[in-house]
Amino acid sequence: MNLLRFLFHAPKSDWMQFAVFLAGLLLFVLPFEWVRKKIGWTQEVSRKMIHIGVGMLVVFTPYYFQSNRPIIWLALIFIIVNFTAVRSGRLKGMHGTDRFSYGTIFYPLSILILLLVCWTGHKVIFMTSVLIMTLPDALAAIIGENMKAPHRYWLGQDEKSLEGSAAMFFSAWICVVVALSAFGPLDDLKFGLAQIIWIGCVTACMATAFESISSMGSDNFTVPLGSAFILYFMLSQSHSGIIQLSLGIILALFIAVVSCRIRFLSISGSVCAFILAAIIFGAGGWTWALPILAFYISSSILSKTGKVRKRKFDTVFEKSSLRDAGQVLANGGLPGLLIILHTLFPHPVWYYSYLGALAAVNADTWATEIGVLSKTRPRLITTGQPVDHGISGGITITGLIGAFLGAWIIVCSGLPLQPENAGLSIVHPLFWWIAGAGFIATLIDSCLGASLQGQYVCTICRQTTEKKTHCGHPAKPVSGFIWMNNDRVNLICAIFGVFFVIFGWIIGI
């Protein structure tokens, strides 16, 4: 009953507006396929026109709706309609594109989340974030796709261009400046010119980074939600908080560039690391930065240790020591989410969970990097059967010791600058519980690697490998699931690290 009341509680005038608004959208969207064929527009052109038209209508909804409930229903309807259309191949004028994309599903989904989070008290954030998704994101694609000789690059599955990214940055900057100036009074906010220019620059920088790393239409999700978080932080913090975020972005950029130059990270990994580091350094300061720096520096150094001996495992491991965006997200995505949750809903449990996630991924990294150097032959964790070094699920005593040390170092790194309400110490039971959670999560990671992670055999050299392609030919699946790759196993490892920490906190350790 409470849920129904929440979903339908709105003035009658809003529901009348809803009927008119929905009818207008349908009349705008549905004829586009017919119009496209008559005029000769490409599917991409009509899709972008719908993207911009619908977005601009949504941007101004706070001016003619008192409640967000009708728009929530609107978003839910279009999520269902768009999902059905994408799966069935219908409404090409709305969904058609040269590449497969879930963009039209992410579009109303991100609007739905923004409605739930920002409508009350943060309408300017809602409107500005939707505006960034509507105009700059579309402009980046239009310029990138229509220039005769753009400077192209690939960070994910989709091709991008430097010209499109530049258009994204400058147009997002302008949109934020205009939106804050025009919409600020809705939330009783007033800004100085220098302030909104700086907020616009920071937001545009992060929005461009999100757009560059996104693929398959996910920029319709990452760009508005990422922009909303940056705007929320900068609008809710004092002047010192804004300076901290700005310095965090500069430090994150420095680390990303250096990491790429010394080949700790690939280009895609560097961009992804920049985004995560900017959020963690900027929103959390050194309190949250120190543990992830301990993970990043120690794991990167270990990956280069014994490089000559480890080179033979390049044909076995799915990923090399040059970490890409998938590896960065698998290891750092959950910690990044936890600091966002802490910013929105402050509580010490998020910091404990943050340490648990990093303890898990660091323990796993240390176990792998140290374990492959062991002279003792590994044994499969599920059966105890001896296996070759590098086989997923194989463990050694040396690797297990490395796993515990990796988890312990992360928890220790969280002590010097911990939040005042954390109260961790080396004699506190929770300290050892977090370290143990990271260690146990690593054992679960090994179990998943031995049982569920996809394993292949090369059809040419007969070597067992995690790679889908080996010796230039497709490898033959022999065990596990092809969708369960190393990145997903690492993400699950981090999730278990958080789960065990929260469980320990709940039972009062």
Image (cartoon, rainbow, N blue to C red):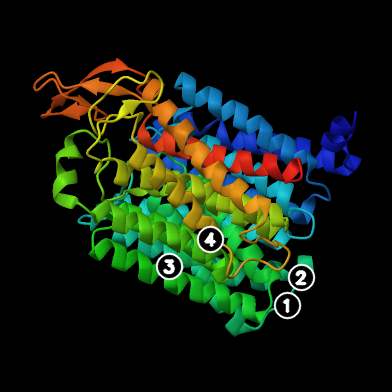
Q: Residue at x 9, y 21 (%)?
A: 460
Q: Cα distance, mark 1 to mark 4?
A: 43 Å
Q: Secondary structure at mark 3?
A: helix
The residue shown at (30%, 68%) is 258
The reply to whether discs 3 and 1 touch (Cβ–Cβ < 8 Å) is: no
Q: Which one is nearer the viewer's eye here, 128 or 307?
A: 307
Q: Position of residue 27 (x, y in %)?
A: 62, 34
Give the percent coordinates (x, y) of residue 446.
41, 31
Residue on which disc 1 sits: 190
Q: CA distance from mark 1 to mark 2?
A: 7 Å
Q: Are marks 1 and 2 in contact (CB under 8 Å)?
A: yes
Image depth: mark 3 or mark 1 in front: 3
Of tags 1 and 4, which is closer to the observer?
4
Q: CA distance from mark 4 to mark 2?
A: 46 Å
Which of the two discs, 4 and 3, sits closer to the camera?
A: 4
Amino acid at the residue labelled 4: Cys
Q: Earlier in the sequence, mark 2 or mark 3?
A: 2
The residue that mark 2 highlights is 185
Answer few, some or many: residues within 10 Å of disc 1's Cα (few below 14, many 20 plus, some between 14 and 19).
Answer: few
Rendering coords of residue 85 (x, y %): 51, 24
Q: Are marks 4 and 3 in contact (CB under 8 Å)?
A: no
Front residue of 386/271: it is: 386
Q: Residue at x 13, y 20 (%)?
A: 462
In the figure, residue 191 lies in which quadrant? bottom right
- Looking at the rendered structure, the kind of residue marked 1 is Lys
Quadrant location of residue 227?
bottom right
Helix, strand or loop for disc 4: helix
Q: Which residue is under mark 4?
A: 412
Q: How packed is label 2: few (under 14 Cα within 10 Å), some, or many (20 or more)?
A: few
